[in-house]
Image: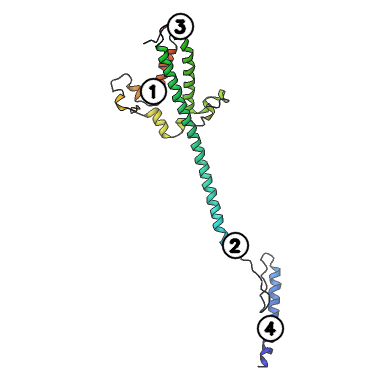
Protein backbone atom coordinates (compact mmCIF):
# COMPACT_ATOMS: atom_id res chain seq x y z
CA UNK A 1 0.00 0.00 0.00
CA UNK A 2 2.88 2.40 0.51
CA UNK A 3 3.92 2.05 -3.16
CA UNK A 4 0.48 3.11 -4.47
CA UNK A 5 0.90 6.91 -4.16
CA UNK A 6 4.42 6.68 -5.49
CA UNK A 7 3.25 4.90 -8.66
CA UNK A 8 0.45 7.43 -9.26
CA UNK A 9 2.87 10.29 -8.84
CA UNK A 10 5.24 8.73 -11.30
CA UNK A 11 2.52 8.30 -13.89
CA UNK A 12 1.45 11.89 -13.43
CA UNK A 13 5.00 13.08 -13.93
CA UNK A 14 5.40 11.00 -17.12
CA UNK A 15 2.16 12.40 -18.61
CA UNK A 16 2.92 16.04 -17.87
CA UNK A 17 5.30 16.59 -20.89
CA UNK A 18 2.70 15.06 -23.21
CA UNK A 19 0.01 17.45 -21.99
CA UNK A 20 2.39 20.37 -22.35
CA UNK A 21 3.24 19.42 -25.94
CA UNK A 22 -0.44 18.98 -26.77
CA UNK A 23 -1.23 22.48 -25.48
CA UNK A 24 1.62 23.98 -27.52
CA UNK A 25 0.46 22.30 -30.73
CA UNK A 26 -3.12 23.40 -30.13
CA UNK A 27 -1.98 27.00 -29.65
CA UNK A 28 -0.07 26.89 -32.94
CA UNK A 29 -3.16 25.73 -34.89
CA UNK A 30 -4.91 29.09 -35.06
CA UNK A 31 -7.56 27.89 -37.53
CA UNK A 32 -8.96 25.36 -35.08
CA UNK A 33 -10.92 26.18 -31.94
CA UNK A 34 -8.92 25.69 -28.82
CA UNK A 35 -10.13 22.62 -26.93
CA UNK A 36 -11.20 23.10 -23.40
CA UNK A 37 -8.78 21.66 -20.87
CA UNK A 38 -9.85 18.37 -19.36
CA UNK A 39 -11.65 18.78 -16.13
CA UNK A 40 -9.61 17.62 -13.20
CA UNK A 41 -11.13 15.10 -10.91
CA UNK A 42 -13.00 16.95 -8.26
CA UNK A 43 -12.32 20.30 -9.97
CA UNK A 44 -14.66 22.84 -11.62
CA UNK A 45 -16.39 21.67 -14.82
CA UNK A 46 -16.25 23.62 -18.10
CA UNK A 47 -19.10 23.89 -20.65
CA UNK A 48 -18.18 22.96 -24.21
CA UNK A 49 -20.07 24.60 -27.09
CA UNK A 50 -21.51 22.13 -29.56
CA UNK A 51 -22.22 23.68 -33.00
CA UNK A 52 -23.80 20.47 -34.22
CA UNK A 53 -26.36 20.65 -31.45
CA UNK A 54 -27.14 24.28 -32.29
CA UNK A 55 -27.66 23.46 -35.96
CA UNK A 56 -29.78 20.45 -35.09
CA UNK A 57 -32.03 22.57 -32.87
CA UNK A 58 -32.30 25.55 -35.25
CA UNK A 59 -32.83 23.90 -38.65
CA UNK A 60 -36.59 23.20 -38.12
CA UNK A 61 -37.13 26.91 -37.46
CA UNK A 62 -35.11 27.86 -40.55
CA UNK A 63 -37.08 25.39 -42.65
CA UNK A 64 -40.37 26.76 -41.30
CA UNK A 65 -39.28 30.32 -42.12
CA UNK A 66 -38.45 29.34 -45.72
CA UNK A 67 -41.85 27.64 -46.08
CA UNK A 68 -43.65 30.75 -44.78
CA UNK A 69 -41.76 33.00 -47.21
CA UNK A 70 -42.53 30.67 -50.13
CA UNK A 71 -46.24 30.47 -49.25
CA UNK A 72 -46.49 34.26 -48.95
CA UNK A 73 -44.74 34.76 -52.30
CA UNK A 74 -47.11 32.34 -54.04
CA UNK A 75 -50.07 34.01 -52.35
CA UNK A 76 -48.99 37.46 -53.51
CA UNK A 77 -48.62 36.20 -57.08
CA UNK A 78 -52.08 34.63 -57.00
CA UNK A 79 -53.63 37.75 -55.47
CA UNK A 80 -52.15 39.96 -58.18
CA UNK A 81 -53.70 37.69 -60.80
CA UNK A 82 -57.05 37.74 -58.99
CA UNK A 83 -56.91 41.53 -58.84
CA UNK A 84 -56.55 41.82 -62.63
CA UNK A 85 -59.37 39.35 -63.22
CA UNK A 86 -61.60 41.18 -60.72
CA UNK A 87 -60.98 44.46 -62.53
CA UNK A 88 -61.86 42.77 -65.82
CA UNK A 89 -65.06 41.41 -64.29
CA UNK A 90 -66.01 44.91 -63.11
CA UNK A 91 -65.40 46.30 -66.60
CA UNK A 92 -67.65 43.65 -68.11
CA UNK A 93 -70.41 44.61 -65.67
CA UNK A 94 -70.08 48.27 -66.68
CA UNK A 95 -70.16 47.16 -70.31
CA UNK A 96 -73.51 45.46 -69.71
CA UNK A 97 -74.87 48.61 -68.07
CA UNK A 98 -73.85 50.72 -71.06
CA UNK A 99 -75.44 48.19 -73.40
CA UNK A 100 -78.73 48.45 -71.49
CA UNK A 101 -78.62 52.25 -71.66
CA UNK A 102 -78.17 52.18 -75.44
CA UNK A 103 -80.99 49.68 -75.76
CA UNK A 104 -83.37 51.90 -73.78
CA UNK A 105 -82.29 54.99 -75.72
CA UNK A 106 -82.96 53.14 -78.99
CA UNK A 107 -86.44 52.29 -77.78
CA UNK A 108 -87.10 55.92 -76.87
CA UNK A 109 -85.75 57.10 -80.23
CA UNK A 110 -87.86 54.74 -82.33
CA UNK A 111 -91.06 55.51 -80.40
CA UNK A 112 -90.96 59.29 -80.84
CA UNK A 113 -93.90 60.70 -82.83
CA UNK A 114 -92.06 63.44 -84.75
CA UNK A 115 -88.64 64.13 -86.29
CA UNK A 116 -87.80 67.02 -83.96
CA UNK A 117 -88.07 64.88 -80.83
CA UNK A 118 -86.24 62.03 -82.53
CA UNK A 119 -83.29 64.28 -83.45
CA UNK A 120 -83.03 65.35 -79.80
CA UNK A 121 -82.21 61.76 -78.83
CA UNK A 122 -79.49 61.24 -81.43
CA UNK A 123 -76.65 63.10 -79.61
CA UNK A 124 -77.42 61.13 -76.45
CA UNK A 125 -77.33 57.88 -78.40
CA UNK A 126 -74.07 58.77 -80.17
CA UNK A 127 -72.36 59.65 -76.88
CA UNK A 128 -73.44 56.40 -75.28
CA UNK A 129 -72.31 54.42 -78.32
CA UNK A 130 -68.85 55.99 -78.02
CA UNK A 131 -68.67 55.07 -74.33
CA UNK A 132 -69.71 51.51 -75.09
CA UNK A 133 -67.11 51.18 -77.85
CA UNK A 134 -64.33 52.46 -75.57
CA UNK A 135 -65.49 50.17 -72.80
CA UNK A 136 -65.51 47.14 -75.06
CA UNK A 137 -62.07 47.97 -76.45
CA UNK A 138 -60.73 48.25 -72.89
CA UNK A 139 -62.23 44.86 -72.04
CA UNK A 140 -60.57 43.28 -75.09
CA UNK A 141 -57.10 44.85 -75.05
CA UNK A 142 -56.66 46.64 -71.72
CA UNK A 143 -55.69 50.22 -70.93
CA UNK A 144 -52.76 50.17 -73.40
CA UNK A 145 -55.24 51.00 -76.17
CA UNK A 146 -55.97 54.37 -74.53
CA UNK A 147 -52.65 56.16 -73.94
CA UNK A 148 -54.43 59.50 -74.40
CA UNK A 149 -56.78 58.65 -71.49
CA UNK A 150 -54.16 57.95 -68.86
CA UNK A 151 -56.06 60.08 -66.34
CA UNK A 152 -59.31 58.17 -66.72
CA UNK A 153 -59.56 56.18 -63.46
CA UNK A 154 -62.14 53.82 -64.89
CA UNK A 155 -60.20 52.70 -67.96
CA UNK A 156 -56.96 52.48 -65.97
CA UNK A 157 -58.44 49.54 -64.07
CA UNK A 158 -58.22 47.49 -67.27
CA UNK A 159 -54.74 46.16 -66.48
CA UNK A 160 -55.23 43.07 -68.66
CA UNK A 161 -57.41 42.49 -71.69
CA UNK A 162 -59.79 39.56 -71.98
CA UNK A 163 -57.96 38.14 -74.99
CA UNK A 164 -54.79 37.90 -72.84
CA UNK A 165 -56.50 36.46 -69.75
CA UNK A 166 -56.50 32.88 -71.00
CA UNK A 167 -57.66 30.43 -73.63
CA UNK A 168 -61.26 30.41 -72.36
CA UNK A 169 -61.68 34.16 -72.89
CA UNK A 170 -60.43 34.08 -76.47
CA UNK A 171 -62.61 31.09 -77.31
CA UNK A 172 -65.76 32.73 -75.93
CA UNK A 173 -65.04 35.96 -77.80
CA UNK A 174 -63.96 34.69 -81.22
CA UNK A 175 -64.18 30.91 -81.61
CA UNK A 176 -67.43 29.93 -79.92
CA UNK A 177 -69.84 28.14 -82.29
CA UNK A 178 -72.83 27.58 -80.02
CA UNK A 179 -75.85 29.70 -79.14
CA UNK A 180 -75.09 32.13 -76.32
CA UNK A 181 -78.70 32.71 -75.29
CA UNK A 182 -79.74 31.82 -71.76
CA UNK A 183 -82.85 30.28 -73.29
CA UNK A 184 -81.97 27.74 -76.01
CA UNK A 185 -85.50 27.90 -77.43
CA UNK A 186 -84.84 31.52 -78.46
CA UNK A 187 -81.70 30.69 -80.45
CA UNK A 188 -81.83 31.58 -84.14
CA UNK A 189 -82.23 28.54 -86.42
CA UNK A 190 -79.75 27.63 -89.11
CA UNK A 191 -81.53 29.47 -91.92
CA UNK A 192 -82.07 32.70 -89.98
CA UNK A 193 -80.38 35.95 -90.98
CA UNK A 194 -79.23 36.32 -87.37
CA UNK A 195 -77.63 32.88 -87.16
CA UNK A 196 -74.11 34.06 -88.01
CA UNK A 197 -74.30 36.86 -85.45
CA UNK A 198 -75.46 34.59 -82.63
CA UNK A 199 -73.24 31.54 -83.21
CA UNK A 200 -69.81 33.07 -83.86
CA UNK A 201 -68.78 34.35 -80.45
CA UNK A 202 -69.46 37.47 -78.42
CA UNK A 203 -67.24 39.70 -80.56
CA UNK A 204 -69.44 39.11 -83.62
CA UNK A 205 -72.57 39.93 -81.63
CA UNK A 206 -71.12 43.16 -80.22
CA UNK A 207 -69.82 44.27 -83.64
CA UNK A 208 -73.24 43.68 -85.23
CA UNK A 209 -75.00 45.53 -82.40
CA UNK A 210 -72.70 48.55 -82.71
CA UNK A 211 -73.22 48.60 -86.47
CA UNK A 212 -76.99 48.69 -86.08
CA UNK A 213 -77.15 51.38 -83.39
CA UNK A 214 -74.62 53.58 -85.20
CA UNK A 215 -76.79 53.38 -88.33
CA UNK A 216 -79.79 54.45 -86.25
CA UNK A 217 -77.86 57.32 -84.67
CA UNK A 218 -76.77 58.55 -88.11
CA UNK A 219 -80.27 58.53 -89.61
CA UNK A 220 -82.25 61.69 -90.34
CA UNK A 221 -85.81 62.74 -89.82
CA UNK A 222 -88.17 60.35 -88.16
CA UNK A 223 -86.03 57.28 -88.91
CA UNK A 224 -85.86 54.71 -87.49
CA UNK A 225 -89.47 54.45 -86.44
CA UNK A 226 -91.78 51.63 -85.48
User: Label 1's element?
Assistant: helix
How many neighbours does mark 2 have within 10 angstroms: few (below 14), some (14-19), or many (20 or more)? few
Counting the numbered discs, the total is 4
User: Label 3's element?
Assistant: helix
Calculate the distance from the C-alpha at mark 4 to the C-alpha at mark 1.
Answer: 104 Å
Q: Which residue is mark 3?
A: 116
Work out whether mark 4 precedes mark 1 in sequence or the reverse, and give the earlier one: 4
Image quadrant holding the N terminus, namely bottom right
Q: Which residue is mark 1?
A: 205
Work out whether mark 1 precedes mark 3 in sequence or the reverse, and give the earlier one: 3
Expressed as whole percent of the image width and height from the top left, the position of residue 221 reads 43, 6
Depicted 101 relative to depicted 85: above or below = above
Image quadrant holding the C terminus, namely top left
Between 139 and 10, which is closer to the camera in this rendering? 139
Between 83 and 138, which is closer to the camera in this rendering? 83
Expressed as whole percent of the image width and height from the top left, the position of residue 149 reads 56, 23
Instruction: Classify residue 108 by image quadrant.
Output: top left
Expressed as whole percent of the image width and height from the top left, the position of residue 59 reads 56, 58
- On residue 12, which mark appears? 4
Query: Mark 3 touching mark 4, by CB under 8 A?
Result: no
Q: Nearer the viewer, mark 3 or mark 4?
A: 3
Q: Nearer the viewer, mark 3 or mark 2?
A: 3
Calculate the distance from the C-alpha at mark 2 to the C-alpha at mark 1.
Answer: 69 Å
Instruction: Classify residue 50 by image quadrant.
Output: bottom right
Expressed as whole percent of the image width and height from the top left, the position of residue 62 reads 56, 55
Q: Which residue is mark 2?
A: 54
User: Label 2's element?
Assistant: helix
Work out whether mark 2 precedes mark 4 in sequence or the reverse, and give the earlier one: 4
Amino acid sequence: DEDGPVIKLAVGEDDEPMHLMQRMLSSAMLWRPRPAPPAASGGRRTLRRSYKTVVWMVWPLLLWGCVVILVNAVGCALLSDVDSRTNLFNLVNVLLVRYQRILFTMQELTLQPDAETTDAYRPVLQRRIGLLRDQYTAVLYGKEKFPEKANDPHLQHATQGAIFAGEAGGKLLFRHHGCLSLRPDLCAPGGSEFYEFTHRGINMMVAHFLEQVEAAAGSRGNEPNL
